[in-house]
Image (cartoon, helix red, strand yellow):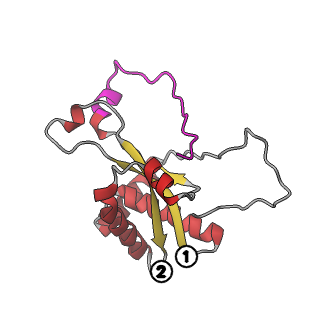
Amino acid sequence: PTNLAPLPARFKPPAAFKEHKFYFHLTADLSDGLRRVANTASVPLKSVIIAGHMLVLSLLTGRRDVTAGITFNGRLESADGERVRGLFLNTMPFPLHLSGGTWLDLIRAVYEQETEMIPHRRFPVGMAQKERRDTLFTNGFSYHHFHSISNLLESADFEIVDTIDASTTNY
């Protein structure tokens, strides 16, 4: 796994110190620019954003081989699959070798890795963790575009009152 900042052995974090989360809401200009890059590379926007995450991991750790837990959509791909309620999300270890090259090279490498993982995206990460008996990843990345509820979110009759994030886990 890619550990971001190994702590000195003498440092004992408090029990409540489990994780750090960073949420980024992209400005319209930045979002438009990233979409143009995705169009140029002929990949989904998610691949562009994951490429940025993986590059930051590489820069922070000084390693070319990095791993992140990437959230995949496992929604059923059948008639009316979008009508079934639920998140259908699974976080999978996403190893990547950053071999140098251009941004487009990195973005396309990320897309190729995503494509290779699609057949396995529903495999329970808890089972993979149990079989490996080792930590699969120590950092995670989630990109969510809930297109199946976009009409609901845009409705004047709908309001998000509050959210709760209870994602602390090691499976």
Quadrant hosting residue 166: top right
Instruction: Judge whether residue 134 is colored magenta.
Output: no
Which amino acid, mark 2? Ser
State the image coordinates of residue 1 (x, y, percent, origin top left). Answer: 57, 63
Q: Which residue is mark 1?
A: 64
> Does residue 70 sit above or below 168 in this rendering?
below
The residue under the point 36% across, 51% down is: 123
> Does residue 76 sit above or below 101 in this rendering?
above
Which amino acid, mark 1? Arg
Q: CA distance from mark 1 to mark 2?
A: 7 Å
The residue under the point 34% across, 32% down is: 86
The residue under the point 43% across, 48% down is: 28
Looking at this view, name the residue that lies furthest to the right. Answer: 10
Residues shaded magenta: 149-171
Left or right position of 134 against 7: left
Count residues near mark 1 (Cα–Cα under 10 Å), then give few for <14, some for 14-19, many for 20+.
Answer: some
User: Which one is in front, 106 or 157?
Assistant: 106
Q: Main secondary structure of the magenta part?
A: loop
User: Mark number for residue 99?
Assistant: 2
User: Mark number for residue 38?
Assistant: none
Quadrant hosting residue 15: top right
Residue 142 visible (yes or no): no
First in residue order: circle 1 vs circle 2: 1
